[in-house]
Image (cartoon, rainbow, N blue to C red):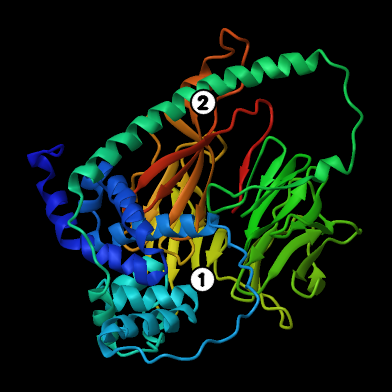
Amino acid sequence: MSWHADDADFVAYVGARWPFLVRSLTLIGCPAPESERLVRTALARCYLAWDEVLGTDDVDVSVYGVVLGGWHRSARHRRPVEVVEPAPEPVPEQVPVPADEQVPEVVRVRRELEDQLGRLAATDREVLVLRHVAGLSEEQVADLLGLSVRSVRSVVSPAPVDDFRIACETIDVLAAPIDAVVAEARAQRRRHLRVVLASVVAAVLVVSGIVWLASRPAPEQSSDRDWTVVREPNPVDIPWYAGGELHLKSVVVTMPPIADLVAVGDGALFTGADGTVYFAGSDGAVTELGVTDPDARVAASDQTDWVSWVDTSSDVPRLVVHNLVSGKDAAERDLPEGGEVIAVDLARVYFRTPRGDFVWAPGDDPVELDRPGLLDVTSGAQAYQVEGGIEARIEMVQSFYSVSFVRPGTGATISPGGNFVLSRDGDGTAPFRPLLYDVRSGERMRSGLAAGELALDATFGPNHTVSYLVTPRADLAGGPDLDGNSAPLVILRSCDLAPVVCHDVIPLARPGERSLLAR
């Protein structure tokens, strides 16, 4: 036995919840043989931060969140298999099937239920399974999936509740593999240490390569090569840019340096170093949309397929709202000098001018907000910069909570669904210590960075995740190493939230180039 008496709470939890976790994942759509592996891996990650899990408001929501996060990452990277239908064969004469060889009723019920669930949207399927198989309450499901309670209640089951119970009985689950979970947790910890070591080695190799390249004649620049697209799955759930490469969901686009980056579905809105505004689709195809200042902010909304920027190509700056579906500008208006877009949310554009902050629903006149300092808007949740810190005003319509709190920080980003706020210490410039807050309680959360680490960038992803570009503080203060490398080691790190459970994804040893995570 490889676990200890101190793990009694964890062992008891896994023993009680293991069958529900595996069966839930199977009915959500995960292939049966893989369900146990994904649940085991998720529990191993929870084991490494079990004290944090126990300290959350709801252990079930925390654990199911890590399990679902693993499933979503696995599902994103699974490529569909092309099935070639064979030529039809003559239908043989039907022979009656003996009664004792007919499909059992419980198996038939499960097949029908899976067929009905398969016709639903992925989120609706998860809602039903979490309610009727995992046994979570409406509030727990809403919290876990980042939905409102009303949205959860609106999902109507296509089958009787008893069918879920019957289907569960057909999914055989072995006893909880406690020893295997603990062993995998320790293996994860060892892999983390190896990633850090490999990152150091990679940095040395890259510097050696740069020295070699510097001795070669500069090749002629090719505009075609600047936009090369290669199929490659993204190891995290957000677009990111590093080393001249933009990483989307399933492709990597080689391109010149970029200045700002915003996720839009499986694509991204970004600006070039000269201020040109581009959109990269999920297939890597890049479209030029307009022009703005090189250091200006752009914004986007998944709900409406709108993107927005301040067009500075004429004498009078104009706020542009562009529809990515139609490929046309949906609206535009003059903007005072110094104005900038803040966010696009729920068919509204939020922007700032020297005389105040405004919200604009295209077709109507802009309305001035009752206060300045707006930082971000997501699903109706708002964050403001105030003296002494940030104020998060979470007053979500038809949601189950409405709170407001002031906490230390400079700048703020709100997570999808409005459950978390990410800010920065000091003056907000990089590198920085991230400040992570739970909106519902206002409490500061563990960020996922060690004491000797700083972030070069940070952003929220879907499914209660946060990603960082992490660098050791010592690399920033120590100057060049023995090999002459003065650029800091950078690691892409992804963390599940509530509880905060992190893993290092990949080292980014690209000296001299700015890396970005999509907002």
Q: Residue at x 34, y 52 (%)?
A: 37
Mark 2, mark 1: which one is toward the viewer? 2
Quadrant of the rendered image containing residue 221:
top right
Quadrant of the rendered image containing residue 402:
bottom left
Vertical side of 183 occupied by 113: above or below:
below
Q: Residue at x 48, y 81 (%)?
A: 120
| Separation of residues labelled 2 and 1 (CA atoms) | 38 Å
Q: Amino acid at mark 1?
A: Ser
- For the C terminus, which image quadrant? bottom right
User: Which is more toward the observer, 87 or 402?
Assistant: 87
Q: Residue at x 41, y 41 (%)?
A: 503
Vertical side of 86 occupied by 72: above or below:
above
Classify residue 325 as left or right of residue 235.
right
Q: Judging from the image, what secondary structure is the residue with disc 1 in?
A: loop
* Label of residue 272 in the image: none
Report crowding for label 1: few under 14, some 14 to 19, many 20 or more residues within 10 A (C-alpha): some
Is tag 2's residue or tag 1's residue first in the polypeptide sequence?
2
Q: Amino acid at mark 2?
A: Ser
| Residue 76, position as x, y percentages in the image | 53, 58
| Residue 504, position as x, y percentages in the image | 45, 38
Q: Judging from the image, what secondary structure is the residue with disc 2 in?
A: helix
Q: Residue at x 45, y 42 (%)?
A: 434
| Residue 311, position as x, y percentages in the image | 82, 60
* Label of residue 199 in the image: 2
Q: How many marks?
A: 2
- For the N terminus, which image quadrant? top left
